[in-house]
Image: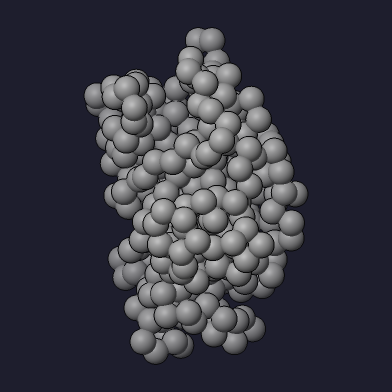
Amino acid sequence: MRLLSYSVDGVVSFGLLTPDGTGIVDLASHLDGAVDLHDLIAQGRVGEAAEWTDSGADHSVEDITFERLLPRPGKIICIGVNYGGRGAEYAEDPGDAYPSVFVRFPETLVGHEQALLRPPESEQLDYEGEIVVVIGAGGRRIPVDDARNHIAGMSLGNEGTIRDWVRHGRFNVTQGKNWHRSGSIGPWLVTLDEIGDFADLHLTTRVNGELRQDDLAGNMRFGIEYQIHYLSTFVGLDPGDVIFTGTPTGAGARFDPPRWLKPGDVVEVTVPEIGTLRNPVRDE
């Protein structure tokens, strides 16, 4: 099942992708008491959406505008330096014992097909394709072997980064990770009945059709289930919280010279079981 947030003629709603991928069932008109996708997750009612899978489409996919996956996401937590080889990208050893963790704000993320913005203050807009987890059942100190039961579904993200601003602070990356509309999430939330072993998820990122990132989730230093366990140890995870699970090698900063995103570029992040998140780039 694939759930999404969208708008038609400026009216924002949430819905369900039809099995053939061509239509949208408007869930707001079928599920009383849920105002948006975040609300549906928070109420623990994702399973109810499946009852409308075979109903007729209310809109064609061609007629909608994709909105940010969750209009009101909870905590947005990001895991850094999490694939094999990424430690070598940094002058200081990031350490092996625990994940690197930072946060983003909702205003930094746009939806599928919406433009990433390069700010006037820097030309160093970079891409980071990622698998994204949305929490469905909250908890503290969640065991690794129970982590999957706390996931509402999975999506894709581009954890867009302004590279020179990441280096402004000695012990943080917040400045470079929170520029307005610099990253994205979407196109939809895929429930786990459509996803097998997380380790088999094959993530690729392309810029203008050129393959830049290519790796398996099984090569993460800290797997998705462990991330949920670790994060929930120090902070309660709530329904609608979002975890960006890390990006493989191959970001633009790693080329010589670096290959920053520029207006007119198109970034595509793909996992076959989830889909493709596509965003053009333009100047703010």
> What percent of the width, then of the height, locates residue 178?
31, 39
Horizontally, residue 182 falls left or right of residue 243, namely left
Q: Specify how the rendered protein is coloured.
A: one colour
Q: Is residue 147 visible?
A: yes
| Front in this rendered view, residue 11 or 206 | 206
Q: Is residue 56 visible?
A: no
Q: Quadrant of the N terminus?
A: bottom right
> What percent of the width, then of the height, locates residue 136?
50, 69
Above or below, 158 relative to 152: above
Question: Could you tell me which residue is drawn at 48 percent across and 15 percent down?
Answer: 91
> What percent of the width, then of the height, locates residue 131?
57, 48
Horizontally, residue 195 falls left or right of residue 263, namely right
Residue farthest along the left direction in this orientation: 121
Above or below, 138 relative to 131: below
Horizontally, residue 33 falls left or right of residue 50, namely left
> What percent of the width, then of the height, locates residue 204?
65, 39
Q: Quadrant of the C terminus?
A: top left
Horizontally, residue 132 falls left or right of residue 20, namely left
Residue farthest along the top direction in this orientation: 256
Question: Could you tell me which residue is drawn at 60 percent across and 51 percent down?
Answer: 226
| Front in this rendered view, residue 106 or 233 | 233
Count of marks placed on residues: 0
Above or below, 103 relative to 236: above
Question: Could you tell me which residue is drawn at 50 percent across and 61 percent down?
Answer: 141
Above or below, 107 relative to 125: below
Question: Could you tell me which residue is drawn at 31 percent across and 48 percent down?
Answer: 105
